[in-house]
């Protein structure tokens, strides 16, 4: 049933792309289906595009409702840093946005953050010291790939993670965990857990850990379970279980 659901979604997305006359570069690269954590409801779908042929990474995302209405979009630029990309995310429901920039053409010394919150018209800005391996948004994916051997061997790695909703960074750890902790049916995968590295700041970001599953052969992300980067229609934070399929 789940496979049929995904094929139908892909057919709709591809059909819509063809109908708009978009070129080959506009074809989706992957589809993410975001479920409530109990899998009782589909929250939204993520249509991922990989527009840079030199990267096996998402460079643009469209967030869509069941009727294919695009309610949010994100562009991701890895040209300065793979793990701390420049992003531009806008939520069309009320024009909330998250923007990160590298003011210099090389990584460091700072990253600029601009946030227009979901529930406010006030734009907040700040700068943060850049360190090698710092993670911003989807940069956790290149981080895992860059440190694949150490992580799959059981090493625990720590780094800084930028949390736009808190206008702050938090020290996190990424480590391998039991495959049963990742809610995905595939067997040949590696499951990793992301947690704050220091207990004192748990309540300032999240309580529950984030779980991510990767295919062992392709090293592509299969599953994400944790706090979503999109709030619900009422503006409240929510957790999501996202399963990814690659076209």
Image: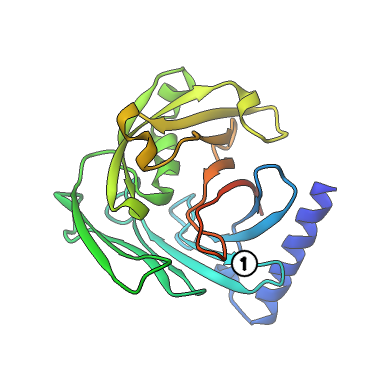
* Residue at 80% from the left image edge and 48% from the top image edge: 3
Instruction: Say which of 225 and 206 sits in front.
Output: 206
* Residue at 39% from the left image edge and 35% from the top image edge: 146
Report whether 170 appears left or right of 17: left
Q: Residues within 10 Å of mark 1 (few under 14, many from 20)?
A: some
Where 243 falls versus 188 (above or below)? below
Report whether 48 appears left or right of 90: right
Report whether 33 appears left or right of 115: right
Instruction: Say which of 121 and 100 sits in front.
Output: 121
Where 179 falls versus 43 (above or below)? above
Indicate the quadrant where residue 125 lies: bottom left
The structure's colour scheme is rainbow
Report whether 213 appears left or right of 115: right
Instruction: Report which residue position mark 1 lands on.
Output: 64
Where 31 falls versus 171 (above or below)? below
Indicate the quadrant where residue 134 lies: top left
**Residue 209 coordinates in the image, percent (x, y):** 49, 33
Residue extending farthest to the top is: 154
Instruction: Say which of 76 and 192 sits in front.
Output: 192
Tally of numbered discs: 1
**Residue 173 coordinates in the image, percent (x, y):** 37, 29
* Residue at 66% from the left image edge and 34% from the top image edge: 183
Where 210 falls versus 78 (above or below)? above
- The quarter of the picture where the C terminus appears is bottom right
**Residue 10 coordinates in the image, percent (x, y):** 72, 61
Element type where label 1 sits in the image: strand
**Residue 190 coordinates in the image, percent (x, y):** 57, 27
* Residue at 51% from the left image edge and 51% from the top image edge: 228
Indicate the quadrant where residue 101 lies: bottom left
């Amino acid at each position: 049933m789940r496979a049929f659901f995904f094929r139908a979604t892909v057919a709709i997305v591809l059909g819509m792309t063809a109908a708009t006359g978009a070129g080959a570069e506009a074809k989706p690269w992957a589809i993410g289906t975001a479920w409530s954590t109990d899998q009782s409801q589909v929250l939204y779908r993520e249509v991922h595009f990989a527009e840079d042929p030199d990267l096996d990474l998402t460079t643009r995302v469209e967030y869509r409702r069941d009727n294919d209405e695009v309610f949010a979009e994100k562009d991701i630029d890895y040209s300065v840093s793979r793990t701390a990309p420049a992003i531009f995310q806008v939520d069309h429901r009320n024009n909330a946005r998250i923007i990160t920039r590298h003011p210099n053409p090389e990584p460091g010394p700072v990253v600029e953050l601009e946030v227009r919150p979901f529930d406010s018209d006030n734009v907040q800005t700040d700068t943060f010291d850049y360190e090698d391996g710092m993670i911003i948004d989807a940069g956790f994916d290149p981080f895992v790939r860059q440190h694949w051997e150490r992580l799959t061997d059981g090493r625990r790695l720590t780094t800084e993670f930028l949390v736009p909703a808190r206008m702050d960074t938090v020290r996190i750890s990424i480590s391998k965990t039991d495959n049963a902790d990742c809610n995905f049916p595939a067997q040949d995968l590696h499951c990793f857990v992301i947690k704050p590295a220091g207990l004192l700041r748990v309540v300032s970001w999240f309580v529950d850990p984030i779980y991510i599953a990767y295919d062992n052969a392709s090293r592509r992300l299969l599953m994400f379970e944790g706090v979503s980067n999109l709030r619900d229609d009422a503006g409240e934070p929510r957790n999501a279980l996202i399963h990814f399929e690659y076209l």
